[in-house]
Every structure is written in structure tokens, then in C-alpha cells.
Amino acid sequence: MAKLVAFYSRADENYFGGTKRYIKVGNTEKIAEMIADVTGADFFKIEQKIPYAADYDTCIEQAKKDLQGNVRPELLNNLESIDKYDDIYIGFPNYWSTMPMAVFTFLEQFDWTGKNIYPFVTHEGSSFGRSERDLKKICKGANIRKGLSVQGSMADNAKATVTSWVKTDC
């Protein structure tokens, strides 16, 4: 069966260990590309139809408001099915100790029974937060496997870590 890397990532202004800077490719997307390269998995970017603001502070406030309101943002594109996939790598940045709400939108539309889910997260010190518990609640019947946590500011240099995780834990 085929493998899938599905991820949410954000470019624009990001937080890097105490400073903010603009990037063209989000940190989670960089990790997703590495995973797809190592595994040969299909690649799907989870994108909101109406993206958050480009500046970091406004973005995190929008994300916090969506979390507090339990909002499910509409997605720009979607997969029709995940039936052909046994192994699915789900990636996201840590937003307020969990996944961005667009990831909830994506996950809640599928039957995860019998799927192996390999979560990966980018962060600047908070790792997975409660996102692995949230994955287990949403993806009933799935086998949630050992995840990969990468500090976002280290994403450019994470190829060896990603490769080791895929070959050892996946």
C-alpha cells in the first residue's frame, strides 16, 4: 500500500528561538519534504482557504481565537479518500499546545481504522504539547506510532534526524 505525507505548514514570519523572521517555505513543509524523499510517500499540503496573517503575532492570535472557538477552517483543497494508504505521516507546527485547527478539519473527514499514523511536529520548545492525545481522540481505530519532534529553527539541518526516525521508528 502507498504512503502519504499530509502536513500543515506556514511560511511568512515565524518565530526562531527568541527572534522573528520571514521564510519562504515553512519549517513543517521542510520536514515533510524530507520524509517524502526518504519514504517515497505521496505529498499533500493542508491549507486553509483563508490563511492566517503573514505577521507572526497576528497569526498566533488568529490561531488562538480559532482554538478557543473550536473552529474548523475551510480547506483550500482536499483529498477524496485515504483508503489506499496504510502509513500516513501527519505533520504540523505546534499551535497553542496542539495542532492547527485546519489539521482538525482535515482529520475529521476520514475513517482512520487500521491506519498507521506517524505524527511529526515543529516547535520552538513545546514539542507535541497535547497534540498526540488529540490525534488519538480524532483518529479512532488508528495506530498512532512514535512521533518526531523537531525544533523549527533546526528544520534546515534535520535530514539525518528525519532519516533515522523513518528507518528506526516507522
Image: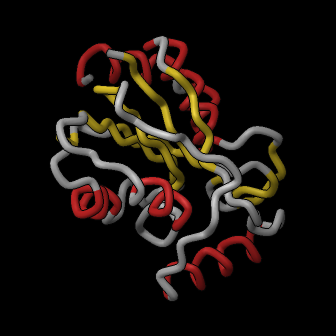
Q: For the image shown, how many numbered marks are present on the structure?
A: 0
Give the position of the C terminus as an image quadrant. top left
Quarter of the figure with residue 64: bottom right
Residue 63 x/y as whole percent: 61, 74
Using the image, determine if residue 127 lies above or below residue 149. below
Using the image, determine if residue 40 lies above or below residue 90. above
Which residue appears at 29% of the width and 38% of the height?
Answer: 117
Which residue appears at 76% of the width and 59% of the height?
Answer: 20
- In depth, the one of 61 and 77 nearer the eye is 77
- In depth, the one of 124 and 69 nearer the eye is 69
Which residue appears at 69% of the width and 43% of the height?
Answer: 26
Which residue appears at 30% of the width and 64% of the height?
Answer: 134
Quarter of the figure with residue 137: bottom left
Using the image, determine if residue 57 lies above or below residue 18. below
- In depth, the one of 109 and 22 nearer the eye is 109
Residue 113 x/y as whole percent: 20, 43
Using the image, determine if residue 45 lies above or below residue 162. below
**Colour scheme in the image?**
secondary structure
Quarter of the figure with residue 83: top left
**Residue 21 appearing in the image:** yes
**Residue 15 appearing in the image:** no
Give the position of the N terminus as an image quadrant. top left
Residue 68 x/y as whole percent: 49, 87
Residue 48 x/y as whole percent: 68, 59
Along the horizontal axis of the image, is 65 left or right of 2? right
Residue at the limit of the structure toward the front, as seen here: 80
- In depth, the one of 57 and 65 nearer the eye is 65
Along the horizontal axis of the image, is 131 left or right of 125? left
